[in-house]
Image (spheres, rainbow, N blue to C red):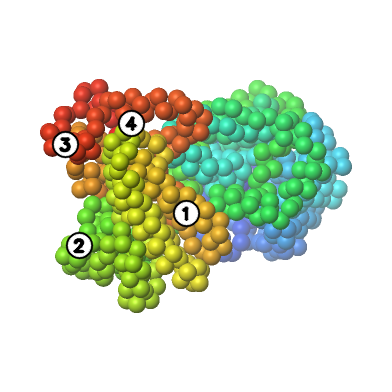
Amino acid sequence: MSSYFVTGATGFIGRHLVERLLDREGTIHVLVREGSRARLEELMSRWGAEQGRIVPVIGDLTAPALGLSDEDRKRLEGVDHFFHLAAVYDMSADEETNRRANVDGTLHAVQLANDLGAKHFHHVSSIAVAGKFRGIFTEDMFDEGQKIDNPYSETKYESERLVRHELTVPWRVYRPGIVVGHSETGEMDKVDGPYYFFKVIQRLRRALPPWLPVVGVEGGKINIIPVDFVARAMDHIAHKDGLDGRAFHLTDPNPKSAGQVINTFARAAHAPEFAMRIDRQITNAVPKQARKMISQLPPVRRIVDQVLGDLGIPRDALSYIDFPTDFDSRHARAALEGSGISVPSLDAYADRLWDYWERNLDPDLFKDRSLRGAIEGKVVVITGASSGIGHAAALKAGEAGGIVALVARSQDKLEELKAEIERSGGTATVHPADLSNLEDCDRLVADVLQTHGRVDILVNNAGRSIRRSIENQYDRFHDFERTMQVNYFGALKLILGFLPGMRERKSGHIINVSSIGAQTNTPRFSAYVASKSALDAFARCIGSEIVEDGVDTTTIYMPLVRTPMIAPTTMYQYFPTISPEEAAEMITNAFITRQKKVATRLGTFGEVLYALAPKAVDVILNTGFKLFPESSAAKGSKEKEEAPSTEGVAFAYLMRGVHW
């Protein structure tokens, strides 16, 4: 019967190792801080350990000899297996945190093991000790003059050096690869390693259909292993005779490249895959010093930091993309031979890792995702509020505690909406205005600021749509003037009126309701789409000027919505549409996320396809142009319109959300 002492037993690897040790006979003593006993009690309950099998030992990793009492030290004299797992496993942690836990903690563990006369000392190191070593790093290698360029790798190297040079008892070192969740349950305790890139995959999935190929990077090999393999391998090797004084690489003998890893998780997430991956030899063609000089330029660093910050990726995590080291694991594989313990293929369990992350670790799960949390007490101006999308959005905003300034031409309808919002416990004010009149826009801005003193959120929702082919617009220049007047100039006037206050307060949000047509370039809507595209371009241009002022802009590329604006085109009653309430939810979700762009997958696909094959897009759209006839109103006729053909309806459903 063996005796065990484990540091870091409540950590991710530690808890799985203890679970394995419980299958053996013997008492397991675990180091625990006084304040962490409750956590240990939870784990003991989960493990289902028999009474007395696990013995808490109160101590402190940062204290000499781990701060054990004389009584505990006496009880642990001659312990058979001293497992040292306690450490910081976080590349984004600062240098002091890494050193205190990884170096000082290991020194104190080594001193204690020497004093106790432990029969075996098992140290969990990391493949990070190899630093930026280029080529094959074997288990016999340690001090090879490798470049180590981050605090985590440096402290893991120093802690292993302490084990090798300061211990007077037999030792074994385990160097796991990048440890991910459990291969059977997907369980993981934090976002680290490849998990940093899950948010990128998730955003791609939301933006693009899964069958759309995208371009990515190939990168170097990423050695990923599940935590259950690490625990099983350590348990087996620790109890095998004749292996003292060796290091064991607990790594995948057939690792995937960075591009392959991302594609594996993309498949698990039903997201687009990198069909074309740029090999690192292409980027490495640029001299190393030139790459380093460019990357250190302040503008470049600022841009990279902004992008990484938006995606929640620490800069050090980029090292995974171009990792230069291959890890030989022949000693570990020889020690595991016949045990049935081997590294499972990432393809076999990637879906479990993804599912667990999305349900439990996605950072967005821990944000206040409520509409009330986003807009309560804020002044929200919504144009086009008297009907349709604006009416539905105003109701949602009012119910969530926003102070809603209602804008439309009809005062009577706005008063009715105001009363409806107030009956639900909300607050609203009425500001009738004609946005096609620029002087009235100036008056509106002054009226709102006089009433509320500020505007926190501006929703440019009011719009005018015209469906007419260019053939019928040769002598109708006013079609273009009317759409520009409301959709661009009116919205622009409000932005110019409210933006100075937002920038001064370092807070604000401008939401422009655009159209899927601005992405798909649908025929017969040249006047409408041009006016929406003008506002889109304006918002993109000012975005770089106001990004430091705490003011966000969001463009919503709205699909076809069943509103009074589309009622004159009778064939739309046969088309798939979304309701005003669903459209309003796109707006209110933007209140919460403040993302730059909100679009359907089809709309985004339209943009991508047009960038790749614009003439092919023209041919596709021409099919729709021929399938759907000109409306009677567009032709200046009062004839009853014919219903679209079965082929036309089928085409409309294929291009769901596009207005033809």
x, y (%) of residue 585?
A: 31, 51
Q: Distance between the residues labelled 3 and 1?
A: 38 Å
Are the residues at dot 4 and dot 3 in contact (C-beta closer than 8 Å)? no
Please name which of the two marks, 4 or 2, marks the residue nearer to the observer.
2
Q: What is the distance, in whole Å, between disc 1 and disc 2 at their CAs? A: 28 Å
Q: Is residue 445 visible?
A: yes
Q: Position of residue 536 (x, y in %)?
A: 44, 49
Measuring from the top left, give residue 430's x and y in whole percent: 24, 69
Q: Earlier in the sequence, mark 1 or mark 2?
A: 2
Q: Which residue is tagged 2?
A: 410
Mark 4 or mark 3: name the one nearer the start of the chain. 3
Badge 1: residue crowd in 10 Å (few <14, some 14–19, many ≥20): many
Tell me which corner region of the image, top left, top right, bottom left or bottom right, holds residue 279.
Answer: top right
Q: Which of marks 1 and 4 is nearer the N terminus?
A: 1
Give me the disc on residue 637. 3
Q: What residue type is labelled 3?
A: Ser
Seen at 47% across and 32% down, the residue is 610
Looking at numbered disc 2 in the image, what kind of residue is underneath it? Ser
Residue appearing at x 56%, y 27% in the figure: 275
Q: Residue furthest front?
A: 475
CA gap, disc 4 to disc 3? 28 Å
Q: Residue 32: x, y in percent?
A: 61, 58
Residue nearest the viewer, comparing 573 with 338: 573
Tell me the crowding category of disc 4: few under 14, some 14 to 19, or many 20 or more residues within 10 angstroms, Cα based: some
Q: Which of marks 3 and 1 is nearer the N terminus?
A: 1
Q: Name the residue under label 1.
A: 539
Disc 4 target residue: 655
User: Of discs 4 and 3, which sits in the foreground?
Assistant: 3
